[in-house]
Amino acid sequence: MSAWLGAVALVAAGLAWLESRRPRRAHLVSRILAVLVATAAIVILLNGRGGSGRVTLLTPGAPLASHSREAVSLDQVQGIAALTGKQTAIRLAGWGLLPHEWPDDPPGIARFEPAALPYGITQLDPPAEVGVGERMLVRGAVTLAGADTAWVILEDPAGPRDSMRLSGVDLAFAVSDRPRAPGAIPYRLRVRAAGLPELSETLGVAVREVQLPAVLILDGSPSFETGYLKRWLGERGARVTVRTAISRGRYRTERLNDSVGAVGLLTTGLLARYQAVLADGSSLAGLAPPERAALEQQVREKGLGLLVTADGPALVARGTCGLLNGFSLEPIAAGVAAAGDKGDRRVARPVLREAPRQSRTGIEVEATSIRPAGIEPIVNDEVGRMAAGWRKAGSGRVALTLLRTPSRWILEGESDLFASYWHAMLRAVARDTTTRAFIGADGPLRADHPVVLTMETPGVSQTSLSTRNAEHGTTVTSVVSPLGQVDTVPLAQDPFDPARWTGRYWPRSAGWHRLQFAGGRSIPFRVSAPSEWIGLEATARLAATTPRVARAVTGSAPRDLARVWLGPLAFAALVLALSWLWAEARME
């Protein structure tokens, strides 16, 4: 650049010297200035002509009207960074660039011409992982190209599971299902709009086998209800220990799938072995101060769950259990009592939020209801009064149920409702020890696009999610591709949340991948093909490009304005300088 400017300066000086050698001395200074101005104007015009000027970068979704001789596609230039320093101004057309496609120092953007969102699903909030029988909720939104109404249909491999009709301006949807088997399940979301072709997208969902928690049951006296519950838990592989008081300070211990010895006084070490404690009111009321302190510490600080299974009203009224603070009960007045309500017991047909159907069996329930303030409901009675609910207590959860005889469901041939009830109660309070994985990306999961792997390990060490790389001293996990290739992914621990670990993985092909954990557990996830989920990609590109272009256009506006006016001003200066030299020569 300096040599080029030096050559121009020499040429200008030479022309000025020749002009000074003319015999006519009149207007000498003006003639020299005109020569210099004309030289500078020619240089400016030639420099503008020799540069490549404006260029249009075509990103996905760019309309045909944006295609021109100076337009280049994103694939042709291998990214916007290749245009830095080579173009006077860059015009973006289409949906824009994803976050990883933007360089750290992006070039100036003269203009962004965003394309409209395509017809189809443009927003989606899919579940990362669900358990067998758990509710899987899929939320999202669609964009309709001129249609007024549409149907969104959720299908599993066996057929339709749920649907929702959309109309008007509200095009958000929510459909759900309860997976019936574990594994990598390819669900499909279909969009049917009047006058438009049907759109079908594949949604990969990881469904895991639900493991019942390890449970410690405290009984103040032998109970038929505990007998039914422990058999149900034991048959499904759960670790169960039952401590039954037989006299003051003496207990009987029963174990199913557990190797613990006799259970006497409760200690923090004993309680740490379990995910939930199920206790009746008399057992909690009879705890010694050290036992009560150990239980409260485990619940509030370590996330242990506590479920009060019987005699809850008396325990709440007594106020001796600090973990039940926040529960408030409301006696059922005679004027609003159901036909079977009498004395301190009543008969109800409970409504379970996650049950497959309505109960036909009458269950004995305490003659009171739980006030809903600050309590999350689990079970209501047939008239909407809360019969079981839970609340947070530090890191753990505490639940209270007013149902006295859930075993009636088994006796009356409704074992599925008995199972639904106890699944719901245990899920509400049990300490979470499962490593969770959240697999996300900017837009849909794509080959050659970064995938962010986030894992949370509540209450367990990093060894449950990964292995330790002895050579580099880092924590790693692994991903298996559809072709069986194993890639190691380093994980970084969150400095503010030690239970959270994050890594980045670049898949090389579409299809089902498996994120592997130590101990053999794995989570499948599906990488989509380039032709899938175009609407989600469009939304992600627009969301990443719009704010960046706003900053780039704002920062480059003065420079672009100068470039726009510099050429015409240089041309005008050249015409004026040459006109003056011609006119001055005619005056001789």
Image (spheres, helix red, strand yellow):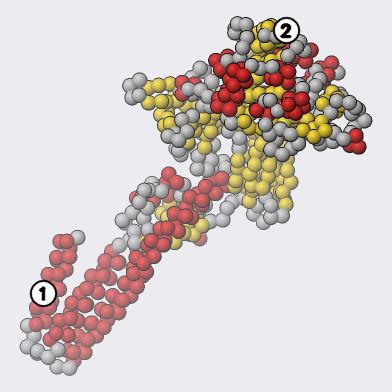
Q: Residue at x 70, y 35 (%)?
A: 375
Badge 2 is on which residue? 246
Residue 33, quarter of picture = bottom left
Q: Is residue 321 visible?
A: yes
Q: Residue at x 47, y 36 (%)?
A: 451
Q: Nearer the viewer, residue 420 or 6?
A: 420
Badge 1 is on which residue? 14
Badge 2 marks a residue whose secondary structure is strand
Q: How many neighbours does mark 1 have within 10 angstroms: few (below 14), some (14-19), or many (20 or more)? A: few
Q: How many neighbours does mark 2 have within 10 angstroms: few (below 14), some (14-19), or many (20 or more)? A: few
As drawn, is 42 to the left or to the right of 273? left
As drawn, is 162 to the left or to the right of 336? left
Residue 168, quarter of picture = bottom right
- Residue 478: x %, y % from top left: 45, 25
- Residue 443: x %, y % from top left: 52, 43
Q: Is 397 situated above or below 588?
A: above
- Residue 460: x %, y % from top left: 51, 22
**In the rendered structure, which amino acid carries the disc numbered 1?**
Gly
Q: Residue at x 18, y 91 (%)?
A: 586
Q: Which mark is residue 459?
A: none
**In the rendered structure, which amino acid carries the disc numbered 2?**
Ile
Q: Earlier in the sequence, mark 1 or mark 2?
A: 1
Q: Nearer the viewer, residue 211 or 439?
A: 211
Q: Residue at x 47, y 26 (%)?
A: 479
Q: Is residue 159 visible?
A: no
Pointers 1 and 2 in contact (C-beta within 8 Å): no
Total number of numbered discs in the rendering = 2
